[in-house]
Image: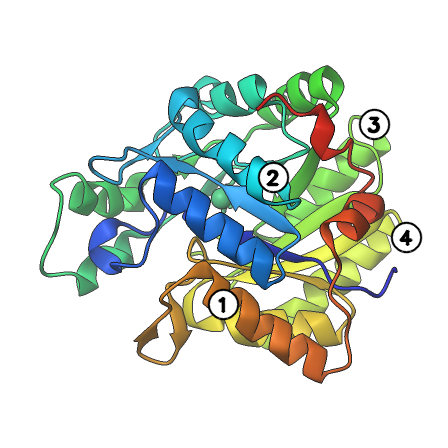
Amino acid sequence: MANKVIISCAVTGAIHTPSMSPHLPITPEEIARSSIDAAEAGAAIIHLHARNPATGEPTPDPAVFMRFLPVIKQASDAVVNITTGGGLGMTVEERLAAPLQASPEMCSLNMGSMNFNISRAADKITDWKYPWEKPYLARTDDYIFRNTFKDIAKIVELMGKGHGTRFEFECYDIGHLYNLAYMLDRKVVEPPLFVQSIFGILGGIGADTPNLQFMRQTADRLFGDAYVWSVLAAGRHQLAFTTMAGILGGNVRVGLEDSLYIAKGKLATSNAEQVSKIRGILEDLSLEIATPKEAREMLNLKGGDRVKF
Ligand code: KMH
Ligand code: ZN
């Protein structure tokens, strides 16, 4: 089982905006449908954010999450992973509101504060669907995504100790691995650690191939066999980096949160399309895809019957 590949799918996120793709799921119905289809295509873990159904703006409102979480659970065995990163400008308290109510098997945990700059995305759009989109992106050249050691410890305390939720540790740079190692040394977090290495966000490590090995070797040195490695890369780097991660024995994350494309210049029409594509590549490389049950065993999750939705 150790060499089975977990495919995570991040279905909507808080980075892309409605004007960038007509295929980005916005409403609870669209998020549920897209998640269920992605799970059927082979995703064992579904990583979720919520959006205001009327405008597509990221929202921390637990009531909106609760409109799609039970629908996904009823139609699929996939592990539900709720963001604690939320959307740009949300407080840590706002970011925690939905996971505290839903008590999911997994939630994300961002391993450091950083300049999270997605302002370049605004350059390409000329026709904006909603007034919030352009300023939301543009102001990120002066935005710090806050995740202090105290914040991280608080999230572990509330979600980990409080709810038995385990974490997708989002590491955007090598230093974030050291932050996680510090938490491991102090027994704040427990193995097996699901380390999501992220490449290509401006403010974090770039999507250059040598960095993939650097990240892997550093994680090996710091965590030994106490971690399960996964990789995501932003935008056009998504497929190359996830393919390389599979070859190197890692797990992968795809989804429209991370990239809106399926090929050069071609928008993905669904999350399932990206899941099917990476699944096909991994299977062509003779790698086996983990089922949700196998992912639960690999990551020591509490089980889908112990969530509150
Ligand atoms: N969009 C990813 C680069 C979170 O949800 O906590 C970051 C992310 C953060 O997935
Ligand atoms: Zn996310």
The three-letter code of the residue at mark 2 reads: Val
Spatial separation of the CA atoms under disc 1 and disc 3: 38 Å
260 displayed left or right of 20:
right
User: How far, Cα to Cα, is label 4 from label 1?
Assistant: 29 Å
Kind of residue at badge 1: Gln
Residue drawn at x 25%, y 58% as measured from the top left: 22
- In the rendered image, residue 116, in percent from the top left (x then y), is placed at 41, 46
Disc 3 marks which amino acid? Arg
Q: Earlier in the sequence, mark 4 or mark 1?
A: 4
Residue at point 40% right, 21% down? 63
Q: Regarding mark 1 in the picture, which secondary structure is present there?
A: helix
Report the amino acid beneath label 4. Asp
Residue at the spot 59% in from the left edge and 53% down from the top edge: 173
Counting residues from the start of the chain, the first of labels 4 and 2 encountered is 2
Mark 4 lies on residue: 225
Q: Please say which color scheme the image uses.
A: rainbow
In the displayed structure, does residue 19 sit left or right of residue 81?
A: left
Mark closer to the observer (2, 3) = 2
The numbered mark, 2 or 3, whose residue comes first in the sequence reads 2
Q: Position of residue 119 (x, y in %)?
A: 27, 52
Tag 3 residue: 186
Mark 1 sits on what residue?
A: 274
